[in-house]
Amino acid sequence: MSGWPILDVAIGLSFVYLLLSTICSSLAEGMESQLRSRSKYLERGIATLLGDSKEATKEFMAIR
């Protein structure tokens, strides 16, 4: 304890936020890996960025 209650509360809230954000991130990653939806969203996003051109998307995907 630092002697400043507001500092103790701020530190405690920071740790709680860090813990909850870590838990939520790991749950989201677990669901993404189980549903295998990340690659589908990535392909849709690339197609949107390239203007929905199927040839441009295939060409982009062929580049490694």
Image (cartoon, helix red, strand yellow):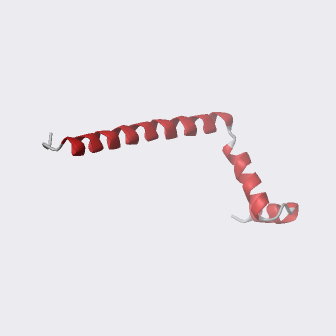
Q: Residue at x 16, y 44 (%)?
A: 4
Q: Position of residue 25 (x, y in %)?
A: 51, 41
Viewed as shown, does residue 25 lie left or right of 39?
Answer: left
Q: Position of residue 63 (x, y in %)?
A: 73, 65
Q: Position of residue 16 (x, y in %)?
A: 36, 37
Q: Residue at x 23, y 46 (%)?
A: 7
Q: Quadrant of the N terminus?
A: top left
Where is 59 relative to 12, above or below?
Answer: below
Foreground residue, 16 or 31? 16
Foreground residue, 63 or 12? 12
Viewed as shown, does residue 56 lie left or right of 9?
Answer: right
Where is 57 relative to 9, above or below?
Answer: below
Q: Residue at x 67, y 45 (%)?
A: 38
Image quarter of residue 45: bottom right
Image quarter of residue 53: bottom right
Give the number of callouts: 0
Q: Quadrant of the C terminus?
A: bottom right
Foreground residue, 63 or 46? 46
Q: Residue at x 46, y 35 (%)?
A: 23
Foreground residue, 63 or 54? 54
Q: Position of residue 28 (x, y in %)?
A: 56, 38
